[in-house]
Each structure stands twice: as C-alpha cells, then as structure tokens.
Amino acid sequence: MIAAGTRDCLIVTGMPGAGKSTVTRLIAERLPRSARLDGDFISRLVVSGRVWALGEPAEEAARQVELCNRNLCTLANNFSDAGFTPVIDWVIPDREQLDFFRSLLPARRVLFIVLAPGIETCRYRNTIRDPRERFAFDGYEDLEAGMKRELGDAGWWLDSAALTAEETADRILREARHRALVA
C-alpha cells in the first residue's frame, strides 16, 4: 500500500483517453498527503510561443517537452521533500524520457504505471469526454507500438479496460509498490 511519508513518486502514463487524469485525481484524493502533477497543465504554463509535443518546429517541441519534464520532476521533489506523495499524470512515450525522469528523481522510489486499456477503449473514452477536453489525436497505433517496444518491460502495465476509474485507482494504491517499481 502506498502511504504518506514515503519517498514514493507515482508516474501514471498511457495513451490519450487511457484514464490518466481521472485515475491520478482519484489516487491523489485517497492519499492523506499528495500532490497531483498534471503534465498537460504544466506544459500550458507556456502561454506565448508554446509548441505542443508533436508540433513544429520539432526542435522547439522537444525543448518544451524537456522543460515540462524538468518542471514536473522539480515539483515532485519539492512536494516529496515536504511530505507529500507526488502523483504525475503525463504521457511518457519512450525509455529516454523515463530515464530522464529517473535521473531527476534520484532520491525517490519511482513507481511507473502504464494504463493500457487498448486503442479502441482510449478512442471511445475520448469521444465521451466533455467536448472542451477531447483530444484530437490520430497516432494511437504508432504510440502504442512505440511504448510497448520501448517500455514493455518497465513498471506495471495495467489493462484497465474492464475496470472503473475508482477500481483502477484502488488497485494501483494496493499493488503499485510491489508491481510498478522501476529498477
């Protein structure tokens, strides 16, 4: 069980529509002292000159992704040092980015959970979101293949297709310390 006062840092990733935002919010609410760190929110702190992760120019997009990752880790370290469990919600598509996170969280026990309900479930969940929160994304097949190739042996791949968000959060809280540790 994840408990307050530990050096745990949860990173919950997955494709758009996998349930990251809902599940991380529920996890954070269930912990006695936690901070939910939303990568989408952090990346949108750049107001003028923002380039989204898959945008152009590619070099600027990569630079801004790295900035977001650094900011997420800095916040995670600060919250953890203050006794809060950081719960990060962000798409981490490859080993390089996961290793970057680990390098910036050296004093933390990194628990890495990939929500993997499948492409069709992600697409469906995206269609039932509030229209202001829908994400126009057509790269599911490439992202899934890349994540499996690069991260297939990392952390805990949780098929949440048949679980409610509440069941997913409860299961992560119960099992993550034993199943999601990134070695």
Image (cartoon, rainbow, N blue to C red):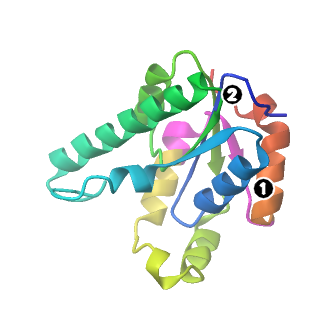
Q: Is residue 138 left or right of residue 145?
A: left
Give amino acid for label 2. Answer: Leu
How many numbered marks, from 0 up? 2
Specify the segment rendered in magenta: 148-162
Image point 50% across, 27% down: which residue?
A: 78
Question: Label 1 to label 2, Cα distance in Å?
Answer: 17 Å
Q: Which element carries disc 1, helix, strand or loop? A: helix
Image point 42% across, 56% down: which residue?
A: 40
Image point 79% across, 66% down: which residue?
A: 164
Residue 93: x and y in percent read 45, 46
Indicate the quadrant where residue 6 lies: top right
Residue 54 drawn above or below residue 105: below
Give amino acid for label 1. Answer: Thr
Residue 63 drawn above or below residue 90: above
Q: Per the image, is 5 magenta? A: no
Q: Which residue position is annotated with label 1?
A: 168
Crowding around mark 1 (Cα neighbors within 10 Å: few <14, some 14 to 19, many 20+) is many
Q: Quadrant of the N terminus?
A: top right
Residue 111: x and y in percent read 66, 32
Q: Per the image, is 155 magenta? A: yes
Q: Is residue 100 left or right of residue 22?
A: left
Residue 111 drawn above or below residue 137: above
Give residue 181's mark.
Answer: 2
From the viewer's side, name the closer residue of 131 and 29. 29
Residue 101: x and y in percent read 46, 30
